Image (tube, rainbow, N blue to C red):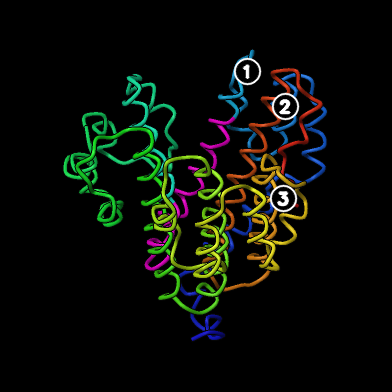
Amino acid sequence: MYGFEALTFNIHGGYLEAIVRGHRASLLTAADYNNLCQCETLDDIKMHLSATEYGPYLQNEPSPLHTTTIVEKCTLKLVDEYKQMLCQATEPLSTFLEYITYGHMIDNVVLIVTGTLHERDVQELLEKCHPLGMFDSIATLAVAQNMRELYRLVLVDTPLAPYFSECITSEDLDDMNIEIMRNTLYKAYLEDFYRFCQKLGGATGEIMSDLLAFEADRRAVNITINSIGTELTRDDRKKLYSNFGLLYPYGHEELAVCEDIDQVRGVMEKYPPYQSIFSKLSYGESQMLDKAFYEEEVKRLCLAFEQQFHYGVFFAYMRLREQEIRNLMWISECVAQNQKSRVHDSVVFIF
């Protein structure tokens, strides 16, 4: 029952909530980002990060550094923290933490299947996979020729198996089908995660519903924009939208028939929470949309920490840390390619 979490939450969840709030305190601040943006070389970035919690992960890396090394080591820190929390967690928190990784599993499956389609080396693809989304039989994905084989040979034993029911077809895998598969899987995953959080109820249900609804709406907008000018029909487009969120169902009806970015903007401006996002963009512009969505997401994730006795803080922390790694990757790339004038273009400040 909502409001009574305080009575029992700390029996199983108190220690881990304290741990995750401690981790949150180590996120980079605006002052850190300003210092990082002034770095001249990747070694300067490493030197600045040595004073943060990333220090131990980067200290033994020899010069010259590469952007991929920095991102890899920062991701390793996130994975270590996640595994530590998962080891300590009991039900239902352990299931909740596992749900957080399913999105990475979907991305890894798509990466390997797409790479195989373009005849890339499987070992090289495995190195590019996100470590949070790995599973035992991932290397054998390369043998599949169509969705049915992909499911039968590999994915039937993974947590993604229930999500495949909607996209098992005998069609051969090509770029268009793979992208549709990714979005169909993500839709099933988000709806499943949403139902799970609703079942948990209380503050977790309330806070996670808001965060997942935002994610569903963002995906609906991205699907619409990316499918403009493709052979995807309106009905097919609508099938890829999640069946919840602020835009469901009337916003989905309108998005399904949009033919350009300004029509998408017209639909979104009817919804007050999204007016502020689109007001930052000039007409016909979609390049900065991702950054505007990330900024709004970060704001919502930070608000999740304002309330106690709920699991939303674990989801929020993982997402904030992933955003921080994206920031570090962008800054490192700008420094490595001598494009410091663009360094602020994609950095999303967290605090």
Marks 2, 3: nearer the viewer: 3
Task: Give amino acid for label 1.
Answer: Leu
Q: Which residue is mark 2?
A: 45
Marked residue nearer the N-terminal end (2 or 3): 2
- Residue 152, image x and y in percent? 16, 44
Q: Residue at x 50, y 57 (%)?
A: 256
- Residue 134, image x and y in percent? 36, 40
Marked residue nearer the N-terminal end (3 or 1): 1
On the rendered structure, is 80 left or right of 210?
Answer: left
Tell whether position 13 is magenta: no
Q: Residue at x 44, y 74 (%)?
A: 198
| Marks 2,1: beta carbons within 8 A | yes
- Residue 196, image x and y in percent? 40, 69
Give, as a single range, the part of the protein colored magenta: 71-100
Label 3 – label 1 distance at C-alpha = 26 Å
Label 2 – label 3 distance at C-alpha = 18 Å
In the rendered view, tell whether residue 189 sits above or below residue 122.
Answer: below
Say few, some or many: other residues with alpha carbon within 10 Å of mark 1 (under 14 / 14 to 19 / 20 or more).
some
Task: Give amino acid for label 2.
Answer: Ile
Q: Secondary structure at mark 2?
A: helix
Q: Which residue is mark 1?
A: 65
Q: Which residue is mark 3?
A: 350
Say few, some or many: other residues with alpha carbon within 10 Å of mark 3 (under 14 / 14 to 19 / 20 or more).
many
